[in-house]
Amino acid sequence: MSAASTTASSSVCGTLALEGGPLFWVALMAILLFSVTMDWLPSFGYETVGANYTGLTHVLDVAAHLVLPATTIGLFFMATYARMTRASMLAVMASEFVRTARASTSASEARSASCALRNPSKAAALGKRDSKVRRR
């Protein structure tokens, strides 16, 4: 098994776990890891109880309390967009213009991949799962 296929397999498994797992469970595991075990972030509330912070200190305290919920929700949507982009990228990489770019002597692998990534990123940004985005 090559390094690329190991990376692809682990990224597919990771996105499936983040997207398929219950969001509340992912949030609870994040609280357990980052609040209880590592003591990096606060585990509950809008602000630190009884601290009575003002000004920039209050803003930073509220931001620290926002990190875990925002990251948990963001991970779910990141996994969704990663799966959509991967599916679209596999479809586009099999298309004719990518094969032509690979066949030309001046196009490297990175160049053809960056050329092909433009189309799936449009589909992912629009939220289309099985769209046929055409190259301009």
Image (spheres, rainbow, N blue to C red):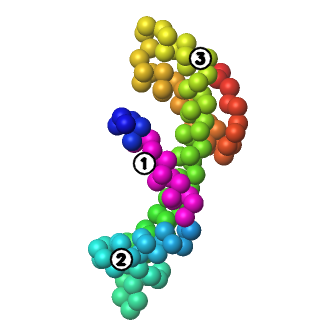
Read off the residue under disc 3: 97
Q: Amino acid at mark 2?
A: Ser
Q: Amino acid at mark 1?
A: Ser
In the image, residue 96 lies at what x, y percent? 61, 17
Side of 89 relative to 65 (left or right): right
Badge nearest the viewer, 3 or 1: 1
Which structural element holds mark 3?
Answer: helix
Residue at 49% across / 47% down in the picture?
12
In the image, residue 72 lies at what x, y percent? 49, 65
- Magenta segment includes 48: no
Q: Which label's residue is closer to the chain start, 3 or 1? A: 1
Read off the residue under disc 1: 10
Report how far apart the C-alphas of labels 1 and 2 lie in the structure: 26 Å
Q: Please name whichever residue, 132 or 46, is drawn nearer the observer in this view of the structure.
A: 132
Read off the residue under disc 2: 35
Which structural element holds mark 1?
Answer: helix
- Magenta segment includes 12: yes
- Label 3 packing within 10 angstroms: few (<14), some (14-19), many (20+): some
- The answer to whether residue 6 is visible is yes
Determine the image quadrant of residue 60: bottom left
